[in-house]
Amino acid sequence: MALSKTGFLWLHIIPLIPSLLLTLFILYHLLKSRPLRSALNNHVIILMLLFGLVVELTDVVWFIAFYHNGIALSATPQFCLIWAYIDSSLFVCVSLQMAWASIERHILIFYPKLLETPSKRICFHYLPLTFVSVWPLIFYLMMLIIIPCDEPLNYNRRLCGRYDCVSVIPWIGMFDSIAHYMVPAFIIVVFSIGLFVRVVYHRYHLHHRIDWRNYRKMAVQLLSISLVYMVLDAPPMVLNAAYLWGLSTDVAAQYYSDMLDLSLWVILFTPFASVTSVPDLKTKSVNALMFWRGRHAVAPITVTNTHRAANQTRTLTRGVH
């Protein structure tokens, strides 16, 4: 069943606000604390949330406006270029970051010696993370903005039809589909399931070799985020691969179309799966929600102490005289 315009709007508006608030909440606590900010396992989470925050504040809002009005928010070539670039590059950045996270968790848990020295950390942590975060920005900058494209803009289409500039050359469109969508989805599914199997096996058969108190949270962190991708992103990517290999596009066509419309859900629901990155989550959540009570409770104490200090001052003054 095709998504109606109203259905699409509400399915994006409802999760957008809590997703934004939760993203800011997680980033605040991860960036505020030096130990959390310095932890290697948190770097990819921070980048995913930062890139996702930009997508939520721009791409998601612009899509909501587009589906509501039936036309691009600003019917100008400049806006269309920016919209297509942000939608394409940042979404792929987050997908590749998640794919790398699913690989890196195996290194962090089972091969920590690969990250013992600065040179090893550069090789097995910083370089891969930098590549997956920068490569899509360069690729789509070339394909959408720098290289001339004769495809006309249509302000009544998603991204003004500008994404056609990527798929107009068949082999580039094939590369984009496989390298930026199908391969990350495959890596996320395979390595996440592999991590779950390895964790269970080592936990109950080789538990003496690994201190699971230090690594349980990293495993849960990855598996919870991976679940979002496996449920929302992997099925349409499997269908896309099947279409490329000859499956009739009439098979599950409506489901495929609906899931493409809901592709931004991956960004919207990632913060909910990432919230386990924050230690002492219950306490910090209560403090964030009830901060006004804390300020209200402090006031009487301050006043009481002030009066007490004044009374003590008057008593000492009388004693002197």
Image (cartoon, grey):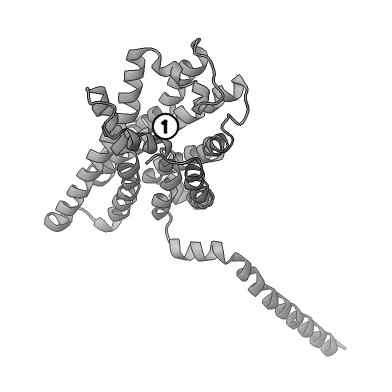
Q: In this orientation, which residue lies closer to the viewer: 60 or 208? A: 60
Q: Is residue 223 left or right of residue 145?
A: left
Label 1 crowding class (10 Å Cα cut-off): few <14, some 14-19, many 20+? many
- Give the position of the N terminus as an image quadrant: top left
- Give the position of the C terminus as an image quadrant: bottom right
Name the residue furthest left: 205
> Residue 91, image x and y in percent?
43, 33
Q: Is residue 319 left or right of residue 294?
A: right
Residue 135: tell me if it is visible.
Answer: yes
> Residue 301, image x and y in percent?
67, 77
Q: Please say if 174 is above or below 104.
A: above
Q: In this orientation, which residue lies closer to the viewer: 94 or 170? A: 170
- The residue positioned 39% from the left and 35% from the top of the image is 260
> Residue 7, image x and y in percent?
47, 45
Q: Is residue 209 left or right of residue 136?
A: left
Q: Please say if 245 is above or below 308.
A: above
Q: In this orientation, which residue lies closer to the viewer: 87 or 225? A: 87
Q: Can you identify the residue that label 1 sits on?
A: 93
Kind of residue sitting beneath label 1: Cys
Q: Secondary structure at mark 1?
A: helix
Q: In this orientation, which residue lies closer to the viewer: 27 or 112? A: 27
- The residue positioned 51% from the left and 52% from the top of the image is 18
Residue 43: tell me if it is visible.
Answer: no
Residue 172 location, quadrant: top left
